[in-house]
Image: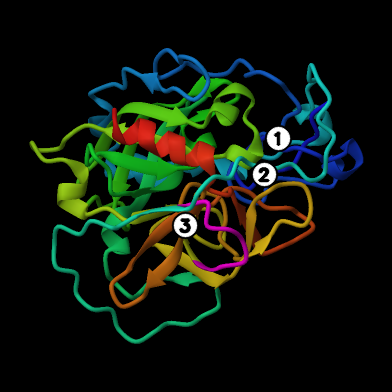
Amino acid sequence: MRRIVSTFPGTRGRGVSRAVAGALTAVGALLVSALQAGPAGAAGTAGTAGAAGTAATGASSSAAGFWTAQRMREATPLDLRTAGPEASAKPSGKAADTASPSVRRGAERTVRPSLPRTTAPAPALRSFPQAGGPWTGGGAVTHTAGRVFFTYQGRTASCSGNAVTSANKSTVITAGHCVKLNGAWHTNWVFVPGYHDGQDPYGKWSAAKTLATPQWTASEDINYDVGAAVVTPVGGQQLTDVVGGQGLAFNTGYNKPMYAFGYPAASPYDGSKLIYCSGNTIKDPLFSTDHGLSCNMTGGSSGGPWFTGFDEATGTGLQSSVNSFGYTFLPNTMFGPYFGDDAENLYDEAQSS
């Protein structure tokens, strides 16, 4: 039976007993912890999902118009939901009671950032480590990072995301549960880079296609909580021609200095500003294969980027994870999935779409 990990967003984790599951709740992004082998029924989809790892397609062209400033301000983070083990536990068809799952790891690969505009130098270094605070440094991250808005089970909701260098110049990386949850692909999905205080300085970019790793698509496995979106042009321009694209890094190992960014919208945050954390990461010693970082970001930050090799002077780095989940018994600690082969394949599929 697959065992539950309460997630910072929402999810399914491996190797957690029911007893432990009872002590867990959502700390950040939507808690939809579940012990299930296949997708559960949920709200209407954004399209028809194909085989594991493929996307929901057919996003509405009216999604950008749907997201008025008022709706963006009122969107609630998925992370505010909670569920006990009885509500979230569902039977699995096979045993998966291992406390040390693994992700597929191949050769290290990096993708360089693409910056179409001159980035003004940042002010003096804020601090390292940083457990959570507003990003005041400027630089490319203020253009590439943004809020993600969508409709989930009839309500307006939010996550975070990041524009990355890609062949199609239209790829956004986020968390898996920020594109699909409880078996349903989110609708009215848009990415708003550089969001602040209800404003969309670089436009609202509607998803033509949303994708997730095969493991998230099939069973919403927390170890593979990685999603992507391919967005449509705005005003005849493609996304990274307008905001630039951060680099990426896959299979780079654990225990790295990293920076995490997002738009937490649950108290004490309100989703109006870009927040960041920084520090030396650890490998989750408990029930996942994720990176761990001391960070107080809350619901709504799910899907925001984690960077290795981050340069505070230019606000650029190599995206190596996303905000994913937390444990209630480890306050102010966030976890993000390891970018291994499956995350790399997801990126390649998205950028070639």
Question: Looking at the image, is mark 1 or mark 3 nearer the viewer?
Answer: 1
CA distance separating discs 2 and 1: 6 Å
Pick whichever of labels 1 and 3 is earlier in the sequence. 1
Please tell me whether residue 255 belongs to the stretch shown in magenta: yes
Pick whichever of labels 2 and 3 is earlier in the sequence. 2
Q: Which residues are magenta?
A: 250-258
CA distance separating discs 1 and 3: 24 Å
Q: Amino acid at mark 3?
A: Asp
Residue 52 percent across, percent down from the top left: 53, 20
Q: On screen, 64 above or below 100? A: above
Q: Residue furthest front?
A: 107
Q: Would residue 170 appear left or right of 16 to someone viewing this image? A: left
Q: Amino acid at mark 1?
A: Ser
Quarter placement of the N terminus: top right
Discs 2, 1 touching: Cβ within 8 Å: yes
Q: Measuring 69% from the left and 34% from the top, which residue is drawn there?
A: 12
The numbered dot on residue 7 is: 2
Q: Residue furthest bottom?
A: 124
Q: On screen, 21 above or below 278? A: above
Frontmost residue, 222 versus 264: 222
Please tell me whether residue 93 belongs to the stretch shown in magenta: no
Pick whichever of labels 2 and 1 is earlier in the sequence. 2
Residue topped by disc 3: 270
Discs 1, 3 touching: Cβ within 8 Å: no
